[in-house]
Amino acid sequence: MISQESKKAWSNPWALGFMGFIVLVVTVNGLFIWFTQHNRFSLVDHEYSTKDRKSDTNELKEIEAHRALGWKTSIKVPKGVVMNSPAAYEISVVDRDNAPVSGTMEVEAYRAADASKDFTTPFKEVSPGTYQGSISFPLKGFWELRIRVKRGDEVFGVDTKRFEVAPAP
């Protein structure tokens, strides 16, 4: 039986471990408080409200420019896209009056899981408003295409829905 005067509890490894854990938690919290009081680091971005407003303003300007152009795209997507195998795409662009849009086009293959594997491919205009190109995806998984068409000073961009690239057989 353990009495109140017994010192055996302080030699128990569980009691020592628990006390050590409590000391560690208090020490770490004290360090966090000390660092924040002395401005060693901050988890708060002090310009968050103006930074977001600036990016939102740019995004809204781009959306308004696209709406003003009124261009439409149609994409002929290959049936099955396989990793490391060229997939032929055909993209048509027409303006508000359904007249073909001639210019230059580049297509960015965007991979949300690994931005270092993103790449851009120029497409060739084969007839007025119709562009063709082949894309070979280096990795399996989900990808999106970001299409950018430029005619003079006018720039139009559209993103495709996410699609899956199958592994090589």
Image (spheres, rainbow, N blue to C red):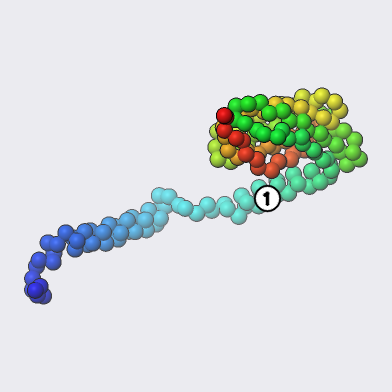
In screen coordinates, is 12 left or right of 123? left
Whether residue 117 is visible: no
Q: Using the rendered view, name the quadrant where residue 118 is placed.
A: top right
Q: Nearer the viewer, residue 83 or 111?
A: 83
Give the quarter of the figure containing the N terminus: bottom left
Viewer-side residue, 163 vs 52: 163
Residue at 61% across, 49% down: 51
Residue at image position (81%, 34%) is: 92
Which residue is under mark 1?
Answer: 56
Image location of residue 108, percent across then percent down? 67, 33
Q: With 133 as the anchor, is 39 left or right in this view?
A: left
Residue 24, horizontal then vertical, whole percent: 27, 57
Q: Residue furthest bottom?
A: 4
Q: Is residue 73 visible?
A: yes
Which of 42 and 92 lies nearest the eye of the viewer? Answer: 92
Q: Position of residue 39 (x, y in %)?
A: 42, 52
Helix, strand or loop at disc 1? helix
Q: Residue at x 57, y 29 (%)?
A: 169
